Amino acid sequence: MKKILISLYILVVVVMAAATIVENYQGTEFVAQHIYGAWWFSALWALLAASSVFWFVKHRVRRPSVVALHLSFIVILAGALLTHLLAVRGVVPLRKGIPTNQYLTSDMFLHQLPFTISLENFQIEYYEGSNDPSDYISQVTIDGEPVTISMNQIASRSGVRLYQMDFDPDLQGSILTMNYDPWGIPVTYCGYALLFVSLIWMLADPKGQFRSHLSELRQRRFPFHFLFVPLLAIFAFLLYHFLSKYSAANHPLPVLNSSLLPIHVSVIVMAYTLLLVIFVISLVALCWRRSNLSLITYHLSLLLLYPALAFLCYGIFIGAIWANVSWGNYWSWDPKETWALITLMIYAVPAHRPVQQAMLTHHSSLTSYHLYMALAFLTILMTYFGVNFLLGGMHSYA
């Protein structure tokens, strides 16, 4: 069963990586239909989830924080499956003063809305002192009640969520997207909530792996204060770089005009900071192969890996919530999203106890661990630079 689980895990990662490359040559619609939207892709994730559950039951994993963490991913996958199977999406084209109670699906069929909506006014707001749009705002009435819909402000009626999508060139019309997903979104958000709690629990658990590696370093009297200064310096530099890069002056996209931007960026930057330090530690361990140094760097690397994974999870799923608030789809398999998930899955491997126990049996295994962590950093470079310059996508500005 262990070999099956490992094989499925690797296969999922390889398929996602390959899909981003195929998308670059065949287009988004092709991979959406033939890979991400195909039955076999959903079946692959279902088999991975089922084999993980079987492995947990077979090995009687009882650590509550570990069970809660992995259960959160199962719940998130279940929510994604419900969305894939049951969600209804469409487009609501509006012209000023003309009420409608219909939406248009992707196969160009008209269907009824459970309400009547009318566009009263559409306007574009601009960043102060520039001609760059900061927001697109539709003033509508839904069954006679006035409602405002903009890039980061949705409307919800009778379970139908409405999002600002586009507008007519004469500014007399607005195009909204609608999403009816009464089961997928609540289940997915429950999974997010459980994930956020369990990540903190994982770090606080006195019998967890994070505390175990902390104890090992304390016994060796590791000078943690020397680590704090470079961590803070790297974080400050990267945060300044990211926030200035995404400022209104550089990227005045209306969707970035959100209070979630600094949170999303800060959390991702902290993850990148820790993973960068882990990369440096692994290089040091590979260059100076002394048994005592390898063991210390091994524990230090894993000590930093757990909060790095926590911040990476927070960053990815805060971004997913932001996407759902902005355009009604918390996961669209954009190359940047996909490679962020691949990065998470690659770095999650050495965080598991059986992998660590195998690596501690021999000095050469510690060398293999540091080599793995050094090579894993390539996924971060691919997520940030590779996607931007080679693959493109909605996040190519990032």
Image (cartoon, rainbow, N blue to C red):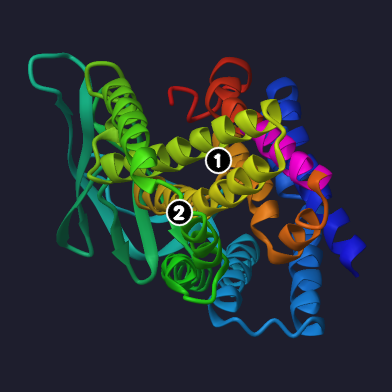
Res 254 quadrant in image: top left
| In the foreground, 246 or 359 | 359
Left or right: 208 as drawn, with respect to 197: right
| In the foreground, 274 or 218 | 218
Residue type indicated by callout 2: Arg
Say which element carries label 1.
helix
Res 232 quadrant in image: top left
Decide which of tag 1 and tag 2 comes sooner along the chain: 2
Q: For the point 44% across and 50% down, which residue is it?
A: 311
Q: For the point 49% across and 30% down, which residue is it?
A: 394
x then y, percent, for residue 263: 29, 45
**Residue designated by label 2:** 221
| In the foreground, 270 or 297 | 297
Q: For the point 74% across and 76% down, which residue is it?
A: 53
Give the crowd class for mark 1: few <14, some 14-19, many >=20 residues within 10 Å. many
x then y, percent, for residue 141: 19, 56
Quadrant of the rendering where the C terminus is positioned: top left
> Which numbered mark, 1 or 2, is in the foreground of this view?
2
Residue type indicated by callout 1: Glu
Left or right: 265 as drawn, with respect to 37: left
Q: Is residue 370 magenta?
A: yes
Q: Is residue 391 magenta?
A: no
Quadrant of the rendering where the N terminus is positioned: bottom right
Q: Which residues are magenta?
A: 364-377
Label at residue 337: 1
